[in-house]
Amino acid sequence: MNKTILENTVARLTDSPKGILAADESNPTCNKRFAAVGIPETEENRRQYRELLFTAPGLEQYISGVILYDETIKQKTAEEKSFTAALESKGIDVGIKVDAGLGDIPERAGEKFTKGLEGLAARLDEYKLMCATFAKWRAVYSVGKGTPSEKCMEMNAEIFSEYVRLCQERDIVPIIEPEVLLDGDYSAEECYQATAKNLDVVFSELKNSGAYLSGLILKSNMVLAGKDAPAKTPPEKVAELTLKCLKAHVPAEVKGIVFLSGGQTEEKASLHLNEMHKQGPLPWNLTFSYSRALQNSVLIYWAEHRDDIAGAQKLLLDAAKRNSLASVGKHK
């Protein structure tokens, strides 16, 4: 493990005013989004769509890194330039999603653990040869009666720990994404408790395993009420509760935190991030790692105007710029 390499990558990825584009949807997830807007679900359409994103002129002004999927990291532009080379030519770091989706936890109805440790070392070696400098692993937690359970939190924390070890041994920065799902009618306070407890479990396990905390990035949900809750959480409260939770439950050694959008609207995701920076100063680099909050408008437009690549790219750049401004508290 080269701690300097890890620290430098963390700093590059989370340095304001930039954030991370999560373009790591699995093929089934990407196909589902295509189907929703009437795009045929083919590998070539997925390739064309990702090329549109990665070759947007000036993307590097707002985006520090892009998370890819196994299919995508091996694809090329229409001019036969690898996507990784296209991103590197812009000074954008190449990342890779390495988990293999979710499995059911025995005797815990509805709770999930994340698969993918089997063969991970060999895959990381392969991705490093493809110039990946960081990786991502996601676990999910539902908020409800008795959930997330101790078993769910501990099981996923142990898996995170092994993933982090394998990445850091190869000087690949691991992003850990313990996502409290937005599904449900829970309150912001219940979200706070679930997020806080789970962060304690995850970081306790990472410390005990000898993980280098300054050489990883936390990708966190924001603290807000579930999407079916009768009362929505005001932006100022989302910012206040989220910062309070992170300050109290993320170890001081962690230098970079990014947010998932988690089903929030594009505007809400920007607004909440902006509000946090207005409530600063903050003890860590804090920015975005959005998927849908950067891509929704792009995909809808591209479905209807397949030949207008420039128009679709402008929507991506507008969204990236908006979140770049939010990452320094200047979004209006």
Image (cartoon, rainbow, N blue to C red):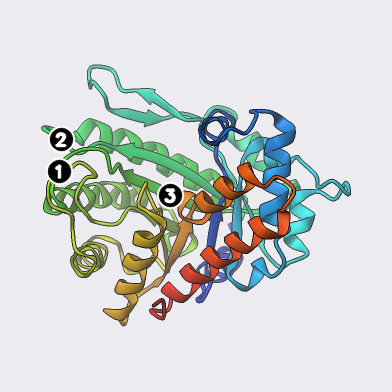
Q: How many labels does the image show?
A: 3
Q: Secondary structure under badge 3? A: strand
Q: Tell me how far mark 3 sits from mark 1, CA to CA.
A: 24 Å
Q: Where is residue 293 in the image (x, y as percent from the top left)?
A: 45, 54
Q: Residue at x 18, y 66 (%)?
A: 237
- Along the line of sight, which residue is nearer the eye, 34 or 291? 34
Q: Tell me how far mark 2 sits from mark 1, CA to CA.
A: 7 Å
Give neighbour class at mark 2: few <14, some 14-19, many 20+ (Cα, 10 Å): some
- Along the line of sight, which residue is nearer the eye, 186 or 208? 186
Position of the C terminus, as image quadrant, is bottom left
Give neighbour class at mark 3: few <14, some 14-19, many 20+ (Cα, 10 Å): many
At label 3, which amino acid type do we have?
Answer: Ile
Q: Residue at x 37, y 53 (%)?
A: 265
Q: Is residue 23 visible?
A: no
Direction from residue 72 to residue 202 in the image, left or right: left
List the residue tagged with mark 2: 144
Q: In which quarter of the image is residue 28?
A: top right
Q: Tag on residue 186?
A: 1
User: Of label 3 and label 1, which has the lower sequence position?
Assistant: 3
Q: Is residue 109 above or below residue 199?
A: above
